[in-house]
Amino acid sequence: MNIKLSSPLTDPRLEQDREELTAIVERLASSEGSLATAWPALNLFRADSPGVPTCAMYEPGLGLALQGAKQILLGQQPFVHERGSYLVTSVDVPVSAQVLRATPAEPCLCLTYRLDVQRIRELLPQVTPPRSATLSAPGLSLSRLDGHLLDPLLRLVRLLDKPADLAVLGPMIEQELFYRLLTGEQGARLAQIATSGSQSHQVSRAIEWLRRHYDEPLRIETLAARVNMSTSSFHHHFRAITAMSPLQYQKQLRLHEARRLLLAGLCDVATAAHRVGYESPSQFSREYSRHFGAPPLRDVSRLRQAESAG
């Protein structure tokens, strides 16, 4: 079942602000792909046509769809991200993303904001996030957009053309943005990840360890003990948050890192396989093809051609 939040924006002020933000993003993102901005945590995205599913790692962040639509697959759960909704990723998760709706006249436009979990943790004592009955919520979720969240994003994007103002006002707007997230519908999930001792926080610590040690052999019992959880509880909560097992998560980390090495031209296929923890290059190639849809060299060639075209 697709998770989709697509009801029209009925608040005139909200619609007016969204239209202004859309116009600014379309002006700044004049070509397809992801665009870095003067504010390091903020990136823009544009696509002029529908695309094929692309595997990616989503880090903790806020995503706002302004025009067009994307589908994001977490495990087997699809999320349709389009106008009127925002997306929060609370931990690093491997996903498959695909632009569903876009034309040159009406491109798919999105912005993403990288979340600083430490800053959110520091802000927690000053706010009361909404209560949640779910102990370990999925690491990715959609909510309806409201003016409280849109307003600081719009003010920040307005400042991208004013570097001096951005340097002074940006940190204050970011603080407000984090506050709005914590007091909004997604606040309980973010608070769980940021709160030491919670099961969600323990899983996030395990994810951090896996990201640093993806090339090492994985013993689930050892990793569970490292984050002070029983093996069965660790398995349950890890899957609830990431939609996959720790071993599946490690495999995806390895494949993404190998792809990065190959795309950068840092080594050949056999060396990349060894660096990320595979003993068998043939097994690596099989799993790479299954995950990315093509053997390593063909996949990298396709990506380079796409970058050149962009």
Image (spheres, rainbow, N blue to C red):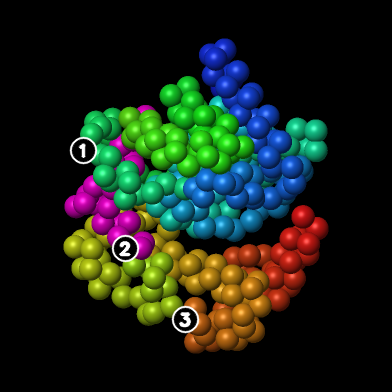
Q: Please tell me which residue is depicted at 69% across the width and 42% down the height of the picture.
A: 29
Foreground of the two, 3 or 40: 40
Q: Which residue is mark 1?
A: 125
In the rendered image, residue 191 lying in the magenta stretch gets the answer yes
Foreground of the two, 40 or 118: 40
The x and y percentages for residue 217 are: 37, 80
Circle 2: is it few (<14), some (14-19), or many (20+) Cα within 10 Å? some
Q: Earlier along the polypeptide chain: callout 1 or callout 3?
A: 1
The amino acid marked with disc number 1 is Pro
The x and y percentages for residue 28 are: 68, 40
The x and y percentages for residue 136 are: 31, 46
Task: Give the secondary structure at mark 1.
Answer: helix
Q: Please tell me which residue is depicted at 80% across the width and 33% down the height of the picture.
A: 105
The amino acid marked with disc number 2 is Ala
Q: Earlier along the polypeptide chain: callout 2 or callout 1?
A: 1
Asked whether disc 1 touches disc 3, contact meaning CB atoms under 8 Å apart, the reply is no
Measured Cα–Cα span from mark 3 to mark 2:
18 Å
Q: Which residue is mark 3?
A: 277
Task: Give the secondary structure at mark 3.
Answer: loop
What span is in magenta? 184-208
Q: Which residue is mark 2?
A: 206
